[in-house]
Image (cartoon, rainbow, N blue to C red):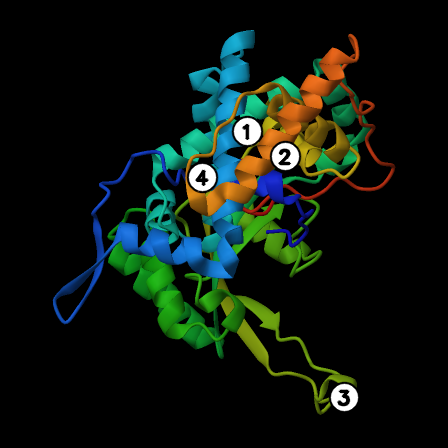
Amino acid sequence: MTGKRAGKVAVVVLLLALGGTGCGRQKAEEVLAKVEGKPITRDQLFEEMERADNGDAGRRALDALIVRQLLRTEADKKGVKVDAKEVEQRLEGMRDYVLAGTGKDFATWLQGSGQTEQEIRDSITRQMITAKLVLTDRERQQYFESHAEDLKGLPHNNEAVIYRQIVVATREEAEAVRNELVKAAGGKGVTGEEFGKLAEQRSLDPMTRTRGGMRGWWAKGKGDLLEGANPELEKVLFSLKPGEVGEPLAVKARTPSTAEGGTGAEAPEQWRIVMVDKRNSPRKPTLAGNADVIEEWMLSDPAYQPQFQQFIENLRAKATIEVLAPRYKALGEAYARRREARDRARSAGPTMAPQAPAGRAPAGRAPAAPRGGAGRQPGR
């Protein structure tokens, strides 16, 4: 699981990540909590959120919802649609990255995040529509070609496995843990849930213990971010089928240097057993197979932000938007000023709406794909 993440500007975050507030999917008076039997409703929560930071959060959210409606209207005008099968394919790809990033299956992760599968599907659809409206096929192809090396490094484009580990103090304990897992499985493959429960109880590794022992992706020949190159571990991982647990492997704990507060003494040898959750076959990176990544990278790339912002501004300027709630008077006045500026421009004579130049891929590395929401995965 990578830690890279290019920051998106606020409008992109709100458009692609806002979870459907105000879409009528919940009852207005839904009770969210009770205190001594007295209810706190969804309307009360919204009122409190609207009062926060002098209403700025509410104005930003309302503006994002307005822009989302503008994008839907523009897509309808231009006949822009998305393929439901492609949405499902992207959702399926996201499941692997959720597993590798959290150690949880997709349904469990959804429950913990407070989202539904349909909300994720809607978020993917919004990203696809936005990208179809803003980005040209030529721009996508150029970006794909200029970031070919970055795409080759992503796990889903490699022969790779998603794996877990349990670290213990001795080989004897590692063997006992392995035997316990195999016995409990009863001749079937060990499930991630079974392995994860034991990892939380027995593993000495603080980084993976709270995630059910999940280490994440290991790409063949590349290793993972924490382990680096380890031919012995790689050989074991790629000899296992999903649900199989490997024989105990020696692992030397990292020794903190004296500068880091360590004693400089060599750390004691530990032992681990590993289990593979899923294997991924190698494939040549294609634009179609990485369309979601390319879209997210481009929409979060500073080189394309002016182009995206100008497109949204053009939609705002040509639309008739009425903000009726007094609380959001300032937002309504901002839209009124846009209409006045548009009308003055029309009366001055025919002019073309300003357009930012087409973005070019930067010379450096591409932004990392986001940690969830619209894209394939949480942290490629």
Dot 1 amino acid type: Gln
Q: Nearer the viewer, mark 3 or mark 2?
A: 2
Instruction: Relative to 239, say whether 246 is above or below.
Output: below
User: Observer-nearest residue: 311 or 292?
Assistant: 311
User: Observer-nearest residue: 120 or 11?
Assistant: 11
**What residue did someone put label 1 on?**
127
Q: Secondary structure at mark 4?
A: helix
Q: CA distance from mark 3 to mark 4?
A: 42 Å
Q: Is residue 269 left or right of residue 135?
A: left
Q: CA distance from mark 2 to mark 1?
A: 8 Å
Q: Secondary structure at mark 2?
A: helix
Dot 4 amino acid type: Arg
**What residue did someone put label 3 on?**
258
Dot 2 amino acid type: Glu
Instruction: Relative to 68, say whether 223 is above or below.
Output: below
Q: Is residue 347 left or right of residue 131?
A: right
Instruction: Relative to 127, say whether 79 is above or below.
Output: above
**What residue did someone put label 4 on?**
95
